[in-house]
Structure formats: C-alpha cells, structure tokens
Image: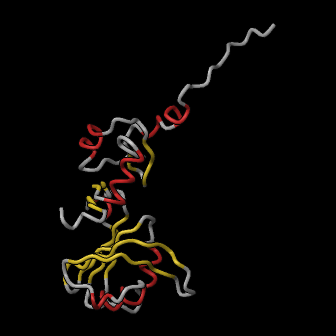
Amino acid sequence: MNHHSTIKPSSDARTAAQSHFRTLRLGTPFQSRIDALGLKEDWYNWAGYRAPHSLWDEELEYFAIRSQAALFDISPMTKYRIEGPDAEAYLDRVTLRDVTKLKPGRVRYTAWCDDDGFVLDDGTLFRLSPTRFRLCSQERHLPWLLDSAIGYEVSVEEETEAVAGLALQGPTSFAI
C-alpha cells in the first residue's frame, strides 16, 4: 500500500507555470491600463516585462491587426539612441535602408546584417533630427552596434527603460 500523498497536477498547467510572471520585473507606464483591459490571465515574459499573449480573443485581435488597427505597448522593445555628425552614414552602412531618404520625424522598417550578410535582427528606425536617430529591435545588439561604429563620429546608447512606446498598427492606422 502506498502511503505517499498524491500530487494532483493543476487543471490549467500553462497558467500555473507562468505564475512567476505575475510579479513584474519591470513595468511599463501603460501596465495598469493593460491589466484592467485583460480578461485573460495569460502572460509571458518579454525582455523582463509582463506582456499579454492576448487581451480577449486571439482571433478577434488577429483580425483587427490584419484588417483594421490595433494598439500595442512596445515599451519592452530594445531602443538605441544613435547620434552624431556621422549617424546617417553609420546607419546607412549597417541597415538595409537608404537612410539619406528618411526625413526627420519619420520612421521606417529596416533590418541589419553583419559583414557577411547574415541578418542579425529587424526593427524600426526613427529619424528624430538630422543627426539623431532611434533604432528599436527585439533583441539586444549594443556590443555589435558599438563595434560597427568604430571610425564613425557617433554615440550609441541603449535607452530601453527610459523610453516607453505605443504602436498603432494595421491598414487603417494612418486614418486613425
């Protein structure tokens, strides 16, 4: 006869396994609004931030982003400030965009590659002024960005925790 207590697995293993994400390592300025909107308790760790897999219904949210518009808290994205007299030339070399065509106050999607042409990441490049840019990405690339800046008169600094962000995305986002 077995006298050991029986351990019953949780009926919702995914929620139980993710309970350690309920305590924020880092919170965004929008966290209280996201918490209030979220009907589901389905969180994941995005670069140390608690982020929802979806707020209400995955299908509805997918349809909204593909056919209309949706608003996202992108504060956990890694953000770099790149500035200096050679910032345009530097970014023109390391990204796949013609940075000379990017006007101040505008943003473009881009990717960047190593010297062998291997894609390292993709993200958005904002031109804040003629000599100041913000590069946003999913992963951290500061050592590579600093190594690639040798010979250019630029400064590269990570500003992830100092800059929050919301992204309005989808085909009708411009009209909104």
- 152 or 24, which is in the foreground? 24
Residue at (29, 55) in percent of width and height: 70
- 113 or 168, which is in the foreground? 168
Q: Against 137, is 110 above or below?
A: below
Q: Position of residue 36 (x, y in %)?
A: 26, 37
- Residue 50 visible in rendering: no
Q: Against 76, is 8 above or below?
A: above
Picture quadrant where residue 142 is located? bottom left
Q: In the rendered image, which quarter contains the N terminus?
A: top right
Residue at (36, 57) in percent of width and height: 76
Residue at (49, 81) in percent of width and height: 113
112 vs 104, left or right, is right
Which residue of the protein is positioned furthest toward the right in this rendering? 1
Residue at (31, 85) in percent of width and height: 154
Q: In the rendered image, which quarter contains the C terminus?
A: bottom left
Picture quadrant where residue 37 is located? top left
Q: Position of residue 6 (x, y in %)?
A: 67, 15
- Residue 104 visible in rendering: yes
Q: Position of residue 125 (x, y in %)?
A: 32, 76
Q: Against 22, is 87 above or below?
A: below
Q: Position of residue 158 (x, y in %)?
A: 34, 68
59 vs 32, left or right, is right
